[in-house]
Image (cartoon, rainbow, N blue to C red):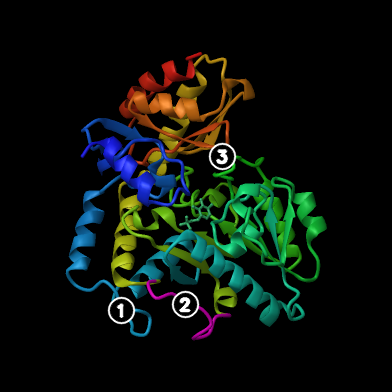
Amino acid sequence: MRSHDYISIEEQYGAHNYHPLDVVIHKGQGIHVWDVEGNKYVDCLSAYSAVNQGHCHPRIIAKLKEQADKITLTSRAFRNDQLPLLCKEVCELTGYEMMLPMNTGAEAVETALKCARKWGYKIKGIPDGKAEIITCENNFAGRTISIVSFSTEDQYKDGYGPFTPGFKTIPYSDSAALETAITPNTAAFLVEPIQGESGIIVPPDGYLKAAFDICKKNNVLFMVDEIQTGLGRTGKLFAYDYENIHPDVVIIGKALAGGCYPVSAVFSGKDVLGVFTPGDHGSTFGGNPLGAAIARESLKVLIEENLIQNSFEMGSYFRDRLRAVTSKHVKEVRGKGLFIGIELFAEAGGARRFCEALMKHGVLCKETHDNVIRFAPALVITKEEIDSVMEQVSPVLQMD
Ligand SMILES: *Cc1c(COP(=O)(O)O)cnc(C)c1O
């Protein structure tokens, strides 16, 4: 079968909740993927930063196969010999005391929201049913009904009401608005250190620290969604590391298991995650030994292969090269590490046509919002590979 055959089958039998580029990928290795016709591409999306370690990383795949031959799922009704070590290794790596495993990012965000509310009632003493959680405009935190309840994107909410109450929205990058929004019933502030889906929006230096300090002063949990920014993507282990803060609650997912398996987690101190008692919360697959083994190896790869430093260095090289392109369409190149957005002027006719042109040049990118192209290759990318990507990107940015 050829690409168009797969595409027409998917269009006929699959629900149309995505608008993918018409490239039918068959295999991948490192930063590269191949379509069913055998054409080779550089993947500059990395599954929304879930494959930071690169496609089919040999060490991670070997671990997946090894663990799959032993045991894949026990459920949390019993214990297994991988989850305890994942919890310990995540805590040692991050300096936190406890971890709670889930599968997808949205589930981990839901976990953090539940945790914040319970903490609010049991520890802070908020009256029953009154807990508030503050979130930012243009946030992205997943697709469940409660999560889209605090989305400010009309399409994410359209047709899904009634919504979960208890959320307040403030502008991003505005710590004064946070201070004003906090009441005695505020349990938590949930924030992305860089807003990825809304167009790689980088807040001004000092914003996270200021927001963190305001939360501390008011006994409000500072919760960061590092699902996309975390695990080396921005050139540090976590994007919050740029501001030397220790958030109360950290949410990760995506690259935690190297794109080989859905594994997400919430980590925090015992004073916060300790509010959960047996039966309060759970997931059949959360903490399964296959996912835990893959996540352990994925974290080791990230550290031992120095991918975080590589993201920092290659990210700044890539941005410099992008900024050096003379293009009437480019308004701004921004980002941290290998988390890069190119914002186009409104007159450029939208980012989608550039992504389609890049695809024809063997570079896969996805537009985010209408006028931002995101560049987020796997963190294993080399300088030479960036140079060769630029040979394709420059003419596309210079087209009419
Ligand atoms: C992807 C993402 C999520 C949701 O993760 P899923 O695994 O798709 O549920 C939440 N927050 C951020 C910042 C994300 O990028």
**Within 10 angstroms of label 1, few (less than 14), some, or many (20 or more) residues?**
some
Q: Quadrant of residue 362?
A: top left
Label 2 element class: loop
Residues at discs 1 and 2 in contact (Cβ within 8 Å): no
- Magenta-drawn stretch, dominant element (helix, strand or loop): loop
Start and end of the magenta stretch? 275-285
Mark 3 or 2, nearer chain start: 3
Is 333 magenta? The answer is no
Instruction: Report the residue at 37% width, 21% height from top.
Output: 392
Q: Nearer the viewer, residue 168 or 163?
A: 163
**Within 10 angstroms of label 2, few (less than 14), some, or many (20 or more) residues?**
some
In front of the other: label 3 or label 2?
Answer: 2
Label 3 element class: loop
The spot of residue 13 in percent (x, y) is: 36, 51
What is the three-letter code of the residue carrying label 1? Thr
Q: Which residue is mark 1?
A: 74
What's the distance in space between the residues labelled 1 and 2, CA to CA? 13 Å
Is 277 magenta? The answer is yes
Instruction: Report the residue at 23% width, 61% height from top.
Output: 64
Q: Nearer the viewer, residue 138 or 305?
A: 138
Q: Which residue is mark 3?
A: 200
What's the distance in space between the residues labelled 3 and 2, CA to CA? 32 Å
Label placed on residue 282: 2
Q: Is residue 342 above or below residue 64?
A: above
Instruction: Report the residue at 60% width, 68% height from top.
Output: 113
Label placed on residue 154: none
What's the distance in space between the residues labelled 3 and 1, CA to CA? 39 Å
Mark 1 or 2, nearer chain start: 1
The spot of residue 382 in percent (x, y) is: 32, 32
Instruction: Report the residue at 60% width, 51% height from top.
Output: 156
Horizontally, residue 260 falls left or right of residue 372, namely: left
